[in-house]
Image: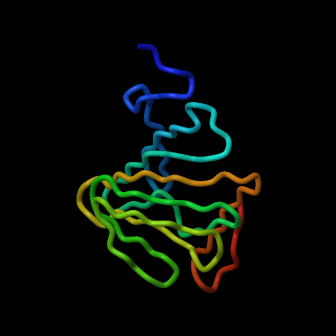
Amino acid sequence: MSESSNIIHEDAMQWTEASQGKFRYRRKSFTRALGARMLGFSLYEVPPGASAFPSHFHCANEEALYVLEGEGTLRLGDKEIALRKGHFVTLPPGAGNAHRLVNSSDKPLKYICRSSTYVFRRRCYRTSSSTPIRTR
């Protein structure tokens, strides 16, 4: 049986890698591979002690994370929340939902990130409470 152009298996995809200081990850973007435009769905693998991204929030898009393997610490606003295999998290847009997921274990952290992809695609970063917000 042949697959449709809107179906892909993870084994058919290559990992893409990004690394900048303490921000490192491997990623398989299912939706990018299939040309989807209205949603995002990616598999991330983050090494011990690293994060995929700095603390940020989304101005219009909503994200959801599902932990497949490993353990991490979700920094959500002023809170730190321990996550492990089986945890599901929703991250609504807005500054009050600034977040960063850190691999706090000694094994890779593997999770799925699902997001809406509205045309207004800005991530807002804050390096500390005293620095201005940077968007991109």
Residue visible at 47% across and 19% down? Answer: 3
User: 16 or 1: which is nearer to us?
Assistant: 1
Is residue 58 toward the left or the right of residue 22 in the image? right
- Residue at the far top in the pictured view: 1
- Rendering coords of residue 70 (x, y %): 27, 58
- Residue at the far front in the pictured view: 1
Is residue 97 toward the left or the right of residue 19 in the image? right
- Rendering coords of residue 53 (x, y %): 51, 60
Q: Is residue 71 positioned above or below 3 on the image?
A: below
Residue visible at 33% across and 68% down? Answer: 83
Residue visible at 67% across and 41% down? Answer: 37
For the image, the number of numbered tags is 0
Is residue 72 toward the left or the right of residue 56 in the image? left
Quarter of the figure that contains the N terminus: top left
Is residue 6 toward the left or the right of residue 38 in the image? left
Quarter of the figure that contains the C terminus: bottom right
User: 60 or 45: which is nearer to us?
Assistant: 60
- Rendering coords of residue 52 (x, y %): 47, 57
Q: Is residue 62 positioned above or below 32 on the image?
A: below
User: 73 or 118: which is nearer to us?
Assistant: 118
Residue visible at 70% across and 78% down? Answer: 132
Which picture quadrant has residue 58? bottom right
Which picture quadrant has residue 72? bottom left
User: 6 or 130: which is nearer to us?
Assistant: 6
Q: Is residue 125 positioned above or below 18 on the image?
A: below
- Residue at the far left in the pictured view: 106
Q: Is residue 40 positioned above or below 62 on the image?
A: above
